[in-house]
Image: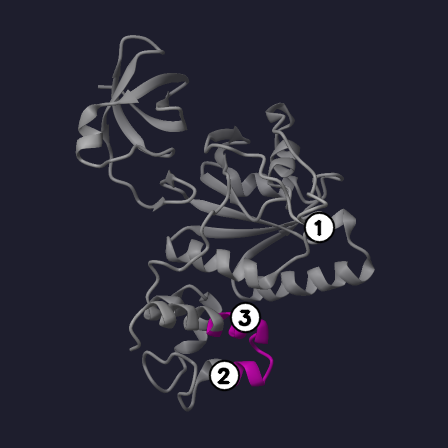
Amino acid sequence: MPEGKIIKALSGFYYVLNESETVQCRGRGVFRKNKITPLVGDEVVFQAENDKEGYILEVKERKNELVRPPIANVDQAILVFSAVEPDFSTALLDRFLVLVEFNHIKPIICITKMDLTNAKQNKEIQHYAEDYRKAGYDVLLTSSETEEGVKELFPYLEGEISVFAGQSGVGKSSLLNALNPDLDLRTDDISSHLGRGKHTTRHVELIKVGQGLVADTPGFSSLEFMDIEIPDLNFCFPDIEKLSEECKFRGCLHMAEPKCAVKAAIENGELPSYRYEHYKTFLQEIKDRKPRY
């Protein structure tokens, strides 16, 4: 039986890429019975008489999956955040980073609209970029308008399945258009009434960009930490996790414990205070949701 990868799901059809051919498939009834929903990114076994009448017979084991957006087997997430319009938010970025880290997906931070910054804003973004690089993240500063930094993304995309994610209005579709002008993805300006971007992407689809496949997704509709337990949070902050190796107590939550290396790092400027403040905020969210330890 032929095998392939689902690259688009739309109106009950699954479009399966098999080498160079794309076959339109439906899912067999057994999937509904077993409550298995094929996802974009799934490796599947299918049968087909032609490129319009195929059936998915088997969904292979996934290495990861996201619920919102619904996609599987993601290698990395390009977290697209604008420097301005809307303003850059470390709190929102850290929330995205925690969700991505929890799902064992490599995050790459891409800050867009650098051409719109004034000198003060540019300096501030450069400072934040350096903070996140020190935390262990790859950070790219780009502009879809001037194409500054856009080509630097290509090596990251090669041979990978990447999700482009971020709040609406930050320029995800504009960035993809800059990477591959043939895509001609629809973009919208910021809504002046709401002060935020309009959603321009309605379904999940893997599209070829450079030597990789990327998903221009409708974005994370939920940014809540529904599945994250208290001990997990430490591992979702790689800079805090590294420092915690020096804490006196194993399992230190970096709150009231004595001889905490994380709190010491805040005092000596080794760890940005906003990273720690976000960690504490997220920890409280999880505590409010789960029984206290």
| Near-viewer residue (104 or 11) | 11
Q: What amino acid is at disc 2?
A: Lys
Q: Whole-Å distance between the Cαs marked 1 and 2?
A: 34 Å
Q: Look at the picture and state if 202 lies above or below 143.
A: above
Using the image, tell me which numbered label, if any, was put on residue 85: 1
Q: Is residue 150 visible?
A: yes
Residue where numbered disc 3 is placed: 275
Tell me where residue 190 sits by quadrant.
Answer: top right
Please name the colour scheme applied to the rendered image: one colour
Answer yes or no: do the residues labelled 2 and 3 have beta carbons within 8 Å?
no
Residue 133 is situated, as x and y percent measured from the top left of the image, at 58, 62
Using the image, tell me which numbered label, if any, was put on residue 263: 2
Q: Nearer the viewer's eye, disc 1 or disc 3?
A: 1
Q: Is residue 39 left or right of residue 273?
A: left
Main SS category, magenta section: helix
Residue extent of the magenta highlight: 263-280
| Near-viewer residue (274 or 162) | 274
Residue 23 is situated, as x and y percent measured from the top left of the image, at 36, 16
Q: Whole-Å distance between the Cαs marked 1 and 3?
A: 23 Å
Tell me where residue 119 sits by quadrant.
Answer: bottom right
Residue 84 is situated, as x and y percent measured from the top left of the image, at 71, 53
Q: Is residue 241 visible?
A: no
Which secondary structure lies at badge 2? helix
Tell me where residue 72 sits by quadrant.
Answer: top left
Answer yes or no: do the residues labelled 1 and 2 have beta carbons within 8 Å?
no
Which secondary structure lies at badge 3? helix
Disc with the residue nearer the chain's start (2 vs 3)? 2
Q: Is residue 103 magenta?
A: no
Q: Look at the picture and state if 40 lies above or below 26.
A: below
Q: What amino acid is at disc 3?
A: Arg
| Near-viewer residue (135 or 169) | 169
Q: What amino acid is at disc 1?
A: Glu
